[in-house]
Image (tube, helix red, strand yellow):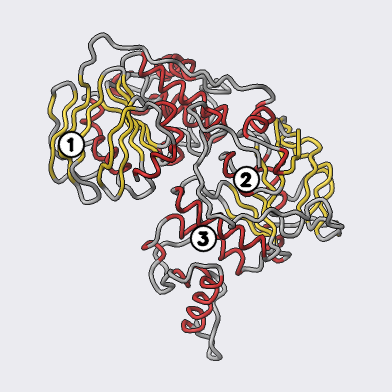
């Protein structure tokens, strides 16, 4: 497999995977099989005046992992929804096991062995592991009641068969990490009869260790001749797991490569249709940096002894795996998480111990959460989302659309939302452009300290570059920025200093010089 030097450029902003030696088995039969299990020929799909897919062909062989990559809006989701039976109106031909087919709905597709695992999990955390595995199809006794003993027995056997025998199937699923929940979601679809899995960004919210577990499961499934369509923005993961990689751009298939024919640079060039400019804005050294945010001995139930400072014109990266406590630190600073003790101040002004978000906003702190879709109103216009926290300042006496639009216009241009139609609903934007709106919201009346969690999660490389450039410009304009992430590449690319966390404690505070992902991984 082709590899690239791991540096600080955007080209290496992907997840570090540490797969045990021998766990990866290349699928050498691809291209020699007599016929694919799935074949899509010349598929086209239009939504009103938008051509989502244009004459796309795609196939999948037994025991193959075929990755699908491309920018947001390239057509990946549309193609997968056709595969999964969500869309049944399209042009072109769909063959399953060599026979022409047109599914009526996802249930129809699942009955024929095709299951889709969405980015947002559909498990029920309050139910036990076993109940989630057999959701909707629990085994029954001869009296018609649920056979709990049989369900738990089968669940234990199946988990042990794939190397997850340490999971207690009787415990509620919420007791386990997001990575284990993802594994349960995959197995639930398999138990429903799927021999073909469509996995849409399955690792976007997982820690590196949890990614490893999921990849181990995928390799096991491949060895069992299950077939997987794998969608991901993490190109390093794609190059680790895929047998073939198909690139979509603007609704068209521009390339389909074997794993050993691809590397990160090649994929990025194909995805964007151009060489990407990896030169991000350089830091502007401040003559006299003063402390904007000062935190001492912050304590809460999920973290302790948190000490950090952010100076004017500085980006601090707060990095750790999911569950390390760094996201709770960010919420506590903004007033969304209860603090037990400690001190925090902005430009010398000491905050009350348990202040509110409204107090934080008034005193110079802004916070863009890791869940942009939950923080934005997807059915509302862009301008409404941007001005919402500031209505009392924009039009204090009565709503004034003209003033709101004028106020939003400047910041939308500043972050380059595309398309720049202020009346467009946020839900119609790509993930990268939704993140730009989430950032623009806080630039209307710029804060002193800007906290942003997972700023590039689930984005294509072009959108990542745009968002990180915005954060670097904020730093260069003299603001303080706290970037909170579980993706090492994100903090490596923008932070002046990096603080690592594990199990609620700071494990290191380092200047970001000559650091790499391996070093950060060891520190957590």
For the residues labelled 2 and 1, say whether their Cβ atoms are less than 8 Å apart.
no
Of the two numbered discs 2 and 1 on the same chain, state the one appearing first in sequence. 2
The image's mark for residue 355 is 1
Local crowd at mark 3 within 10 Å, few (<14), some, or many (≥20)? many
Of the two numbered discs 3 and 2 on the same chain, state the one appearing first in sequence. 3
**Cα distance between the residues tagged 3 and 1:** 38 Å
Residue 110, horizontal then vertical, whole percent: 68, 63
For the residues labelled 3 and 1, say whether their Cβ atoms are less than 8 Å apart.
no
- Disc 2 designates what residue? 231
Residue 354, horizontal then vertical, whole percent: 16, 40
**Cα distance between the residues tagged 2 and 1:** 41 Å
For the residues labelled 3 and 2, say whether their Cβ atoms are less than 8 Å apart.
no
Which element is circle 1 on?
A: loop
Please name whichever residue, 69 or 77, is drawn nearer the observer in this view of the structure: 69
Which element is circle 3 on?
A: helix
Quadrant in which the N terminus is drawn: top right
């Amino acid at each position: 497999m082709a590899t690239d030097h791991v540096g600080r450029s955007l080209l290496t902003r992907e997840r570090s995977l540490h797969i045990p030696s021998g766990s990866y088995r290349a699928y050498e039969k691809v291209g020699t099989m007599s016929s694919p299990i799935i074949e899509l020929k010349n598929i086209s799909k239009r939504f009103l005046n938008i051509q989502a897919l244009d004459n796309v062909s795609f196939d999948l062989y037994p025991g193959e992992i075929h990755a699908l990559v491309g920018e947001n809006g390239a057509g990946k989701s549309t193609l997968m929804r056709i595969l999964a039976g969500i869309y049944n109106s399209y042009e072109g031909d769909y063959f399953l096991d060599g026979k022409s087919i047109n599914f009526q709905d996802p249930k129809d597709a699942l009955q024929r062995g095709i299951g889709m695992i969405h980015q947002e999990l559909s498990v029920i955390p309050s139910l036990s592991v076993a109940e989630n595995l057999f959701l909707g199809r629990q085994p029954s006794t001869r009296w018609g009641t649920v056979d709990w003993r049989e369900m738990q027995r089968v669940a234990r056997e199946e988990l042990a068969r794939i190397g997850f025998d340490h999971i207690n199937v009787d415990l509620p699923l919420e007791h386990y990490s997001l990575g284990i929940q993802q594994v349960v979601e995959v197995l639930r679809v398999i138990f429903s009869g799927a021999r073909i899995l469509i996995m849409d960004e399955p690792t976007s919210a997982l820690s590196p260790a949890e990614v490893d577990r999921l990849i181990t499961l995928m390799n096991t499934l491949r060895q069992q001749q299950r077939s997987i369509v794998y969608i991901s923005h993490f190109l390093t993961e794609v190059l680790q797991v895929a047998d073939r990689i198909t690139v979509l751009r603007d609704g068209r298939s521009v390339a389909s490569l074997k794993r050993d024919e691809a590397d990160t640079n090649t994929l990025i060039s194909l995805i964007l249709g151009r060489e990407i400019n990896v030169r991000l804005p350089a830091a502007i050294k401040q003559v006299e940096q003063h402390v904007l945010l000062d935190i001492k001995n912050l304590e809460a139930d999920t973290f302790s002894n948190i000490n950090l400072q952010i100076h004017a014109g500085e980006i601090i990266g707060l990095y750790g795996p999911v569950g390390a406590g760094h996201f709770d630190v960010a919420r506590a600073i903004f007033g969304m998480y209860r603090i037990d003790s400690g001190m925090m101040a902005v430009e010398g002004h000491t905050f009350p111990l348990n202040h509110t978000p409204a107090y934080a906003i008034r005193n110079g702190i802004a916070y863009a959460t890791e869940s942009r879709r939950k923080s934005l109103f997807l059915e509302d216009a862009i301008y409404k989302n941007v001005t919402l926290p500031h209505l009392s300042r924009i039009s204090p006496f009565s709503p004034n659309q003209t003033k709101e639009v004028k106020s939003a216009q400047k910041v939308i241009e500043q972050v380059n939302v595309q398309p720049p139609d202020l009346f467009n609903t946020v839900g119609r934007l790509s993930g990268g452009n939704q993140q730009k709106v989430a950032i623009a919201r806080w630039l209307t009346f710029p804060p002193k300290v800007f906290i942003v969690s997972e700023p590039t999660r689930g984005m294509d490389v072009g959108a990542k570059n745009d968002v990180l450039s915005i954060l670097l410009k904020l730093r260069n304009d003299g603001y303080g920025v706290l970037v909170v992430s579980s993706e090492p590449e994100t903090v490596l690319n923008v932070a002046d200093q990096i603080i690592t966390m594990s199990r609620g404690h700071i494990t290191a505070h380092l200047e970001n010089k000559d650091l790499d992902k391996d070093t950060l991984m060891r520190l957590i």
